[in-house]
Amino acid sequence: MQRWLSAVVIVFTVGANLANADDARAWGAAAHRMIGGLAAQSLPAEIPAFLRSPEAARQIAEVAREPDRSRGAGQPHDSDADPAHHVDVGDDLKISRGPSLSALPPNRESYDTALRAVGVDEYRVGYLPYAIIDGWQQLALDLAYWRADVAGASHAKTPSDRSWFLRDQYVREGLTIRDIGYWSHFVADGAQPMNVSVHSDGWGSYPNPEKFSPAKGLRARFEGSFVRRWIGEKDISVHLTPYRDCRCAIQRRISDYLSATQRQVLTLYRIEKAGGFDGSQESGKDFAAARLAAATSELRDLIVGAWHRSDEMSVGDPPIALREIEAGRTDALTALQGSD
C-alpha cells in the first residue's frame, strides 16, 4: 500500500514548477508542509485509520505544496488556477465593492455575476472561499465511496465481488490522500491575512491612517523566510484549538473562517511596522504560529466534518444511499462499477 501511495505523490508532482515567492499568494513550502502534516497527525480516532498513519501524514504534507508547484503549466491552466489562492476583501469587508465575505453567493457562477456587476470578476479578485468549499465537498464524496467499498466487501456475495470492492477501496484511499493534500493548500491559504485582503503585499494605495508601509516584499518575508527560519511544529502545536463543530452549513463555516482571518490584517501590519518580523521578535513568532495553528485546526475540523457529511451521501450510478449499502440492504456492485 505504501509503495502505491508514494507513486500517487510522484505522479502528481513530476514536472511541477516552484512558484516565485514574490508572486505567490500562499504560505511558503515549509508552512504548507507543517499545516498538512500536523492536521493529519491530530485527526481523532473516528477517522479511518488509513488517513491517520504516519505515511498518510507525510504524503498529505508533501502534496499540500502542489497548487504552488503547478504554477507555470501554461494557459489556460495558470490564469484559471491562480485566483483560487486568495480573495481581495476591502476594509469595508466587501469583495471589491461587491458581495460581502460574510454573505457569499451560493456558487462561483453567481459570485462572478455579482462581481461583474461592479466591474470586476472572480479572476481579478480571487475565489478562495469556493476553492475551499469545493475541496471539502469532494472529500466528503471520497469518504462516502470509501465507506461504500468497505461495506460492499463486507456484504459481498462472492469472492470475486469482494475482491473488486477491496481493489476499489485501495484506489480510493490513494485518491483521498491526494485530494486532502491538494485541498489543504487552500484551507491553509485562508489563514494568511494577506490572502483575504486588498492589502495583499504592503498596504498599497488605500487610506492609511496608521502609515503602514505601502512597499511590496512583506508577503515573501512573512510567509516564507520568517516562517521557515523561526517557526516549527512545536510552536504551532501549542496554539491548536480543540475540535469545533459549528453545526452550520459549509458556506457559513468558510465565511466565518475567512472573516476571522481578515480581522487579523491590522494586527499583521502593526507587528510589521514595529519590526516584529525582523529577526526573532516574539510578537512576530507568536502571530505566525497562531495563524498556522488556525489553519491546522480548521483543516482537521473540516476533515472530521467531511467524514460526518459522508454518512448522508449517495454514491454510484444509479445513486444509492450510503446507509443502504452499509446496512446490507442493497447490492452496490453494479452502482459502483457503473451501469454503463
Image (cartoon, helix red, strand yellow):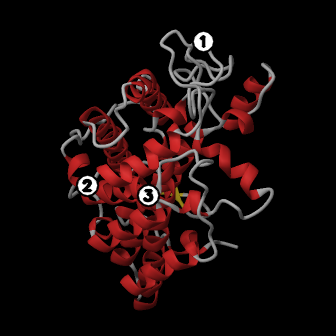
Residue 228 % position (x, y): 37, 54
Residue at the top extreme, as displayed: 209
**Residue under the point 41% across and 81% down:** 166
Residue 274 coordinates in the image, percent (x, y): 36, 25
Dot 2 crowding, Cα within 10 Å, few <14, some 14–19, many 20+: some
User: Mark 1 sits on what residue?
Assistant: 207
Q: Which numbered disc flags the more N-terminal residue, 1 or 2?
A: 1
Residue type marked 1: Pro
| C-alpha span from label 1 to label 2 | 37 Å
Residue 242 lies in quadrant: top left
Q: Position of residue 288 (x, y in %)?
A: 34, 40
Q: Nearer the viewer, residue 75 or 141?
A: 75
Residue annotated with mark 3: 322
Q: On screen, 42 above or below 211?
A: below
Near mark 1 (Cα within 10 A), the count class, few <14, some 14-19 or many ≥20, is few
The amino acid type found where label 3 is placed reads Leu
N-term mark: 1 or 3: 1
Instruction: Between label 3 and label 2, give the one nearer the viewer.
Output: 2
Residue named by callout 2: 233
Judged left or right of residue 260, residue 68 is right
**Quarter of the image that includes the N terminus:** bottom left
* 162 sits to left or right of 133: left
Position of residue 97 in the picture relative to residue 188 (left or right)? right
Can the viewer see residue 284? Answer: yes
Labels 1 & 2 near each other (Cβ < 8 A): no
Place of residue 264 in the rendered image (x, y in percent of width and height, measured from the top left) = 41, 26
- What secondary structure is found at the residue carrying circle 3? helix
Is disc 2 placed on a helix, strand or loop? helix
* Residue type marked 2: Glu
Disc 1 vs disc 2: which is toward the camera? 1
Looking at the rendered image, the disc whose residue lies closer to the viewer, 1 or 3, is 1
